[in-house]
């Protein structure tokens, strides 16, 4: 069961980061943004530490978040996500709840990469 959970987390993370890397790759190849195909950003990735929401860049999730600390994952799709979490969530939201007993450790490790979520910012 744990291996299925880890595979599921890695799959979601790879979906989050694919669009971001593809967009940056077209610009790196020397194409100006107007010539490059515009790829919409991936879903908004939220980490929940003891009922507090933080945004993390989707491209960082797979390399930074420890899968063993994830308690649950929820995915909200386009329209519903946008109504709940704001316009930045128009491409969906991946919400990862961190185990309460591991939250402080994980938060301290990830703090430089987190931004406190508030719907006014998005």
Image (cartoon, rainbow, N blue to C red):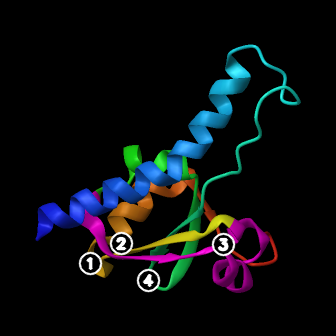
Q: Residue at x 40, y 59 (%)?
A: 12
User: Closer to the N terminus: mark 1 or mark 3?
Assistant: 1
> Which residue corresponds to mark 4?
50
Q: Up-down: is 75 above or below 10?
A: below
Q: Evaluate if marks 4 and 2 touch, with contact meaning CB atoms under 8 Å apart.
A: yes
- Who is closer to the viewer here, 86 or 66? 86
- Image quarter of the N terminus: bottom left
Which residues are the magenta region? 67-90
- Image quarter of the C terminus: bottom right
User: Closer to the N terminus: mark 4 or mark 2?
Assistant: 4
- Who is closer to the viewer here, 120 or 93? 93
> Which residue corresponds to mark 1?
101
> Which residue corresponds to mark 3?
117
Q: Evaluate if marks 1 and 3 touch, with contact meaning CB atoms under 8 Å apart.
A: no
Residue 41: where, in percent of width, then height?
68, 51
- Find out whether residue 82 is within the magenta segment: yes
Report the disc number at residue 103. 2
Q: Residues within 10 Å of mark 2 (few under 14, many from 20)?
A: some
In this rendering, position of residue 95 left or right of residue 116: left
């Amino acid at each position: 069961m744990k291996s299925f959970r880890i595979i599921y987390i890695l799959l979601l993370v790879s979906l989050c980061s694919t669009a971001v890397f593809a967009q940056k790759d077209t610009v790196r190849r020397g194409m100006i943004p107007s010539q490059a195909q515009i790829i919409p950003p991936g879903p908004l990735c939220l980490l929940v530490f003891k009922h507090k929401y933080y945004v993390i860049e989707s491209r960082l999730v797979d390399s930074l978040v420890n899968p063993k600390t994830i308690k649950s994952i929820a995915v909200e799709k386009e329209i519903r996500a946008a109504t709940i979490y704001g316009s930045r969530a128009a491409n969906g939201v991946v919400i990862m709840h961190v185990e309460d007993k591991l939250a402080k450790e994980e938060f301290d490790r990830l703090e430089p990469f987190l931004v406190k979520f508030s719907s006014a910012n998005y």
